[in-house]
Image (cartoon, rainbow, N blue to C red):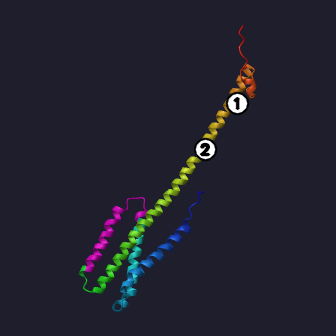
Amino acid sequence: MEWQPLDLPHESLRLMGEVFVFLLTLTFVIAAITLKKRTRHLFPLSFLSIFALSSLGWVIGYNMSNSREPAVAAVLPAVLTLVAGMLAYILGSRGALSRLLVCLATIGFSLSLYVASFAGARHRFNYEERITKIDYLKYQEGVRQEIAATKLFFEANFRQLRATLGKKYGVNLDDVASAEPSRQPASKD
């Protein structure tokens, strides 16, 4: 497979489209729980809150795993604090509908964070693989050029040595037959 340059604007737009479709699908599936007759009026509110927290989860998860820095140590306490705060709100709230809404938003946030962490890690792996491949190909090309230059150097030295020895001993080393010693049997005299 031939190397192709990175097409960052195209890849970024494609990724944003895939993320948007994923978040909408996730939000709709989770918010569909509120489509029962008595909670149908909560659907727009639940859809927006789940979508907002799912988007936040995606951004946090993707950037955390795409980073080359050890971001997990900084992000994980903040995420756990957010989830713990949401759960504390659930326990303290009186209405069953608000509890349901916060639970669904927490589920959307968690799932989005989980999936985004894999997507970010895969993106970083692909990018580093391409960069490594480029560096390796550059290294390989440098080695080929060095070998070719060394070969030319030794061929030039060999031609010079052949010419010098040919003049010294009066032998044409370009002609293999004249350069070989005679193969006549030695006389027994």
Q: Residues within 10 Å of mark 1 (few under 14, many from 20)?
A: few
The residue range painted magenta reads 64-90
Taking the magenta stretch, the answer to whether it contains residue 66 is yes
Identity of the residue drawn at 51% across and 53% down: 132
The residue at which mark 1 appears reads as 159
Q: Considering depth in this image, is 66 or 96 the residue closer to the camera? A: 96
- Amino acid carrying label 1: it is Arg
Question: Which residue reaches farthest top?
Answer: 189
Taking the magenta stretch, the answer to whether it contains residue 8 is no
Identity of the residue drawn at 55% across and 54% down: 134
Where is residue 44 drawn, in percent x and y? Answer: 40, 87
Horizontal side of residue 93 vs 107, given as left or right: left
Which quadrant holds residue 68? Answer: bottom left
User: Mark 1 vs mark 2: which is more N-terminal?
Assistant: 2
Question: Which residue reaches farthest bottom?
Answer: 37
Residue 53, relative to residue 62: is it above or below? below
Where is residue 109 drawn, in percent x and y? Answer: 37, 74
The numbered mark at residue 144 is 2
Horizontal side of residue 162 vs 111, given as left or right: right
Residue 152, relative to residue 115: is it above or below? above
Separation of disc 1 and disc 2 at Cα?
22 Å
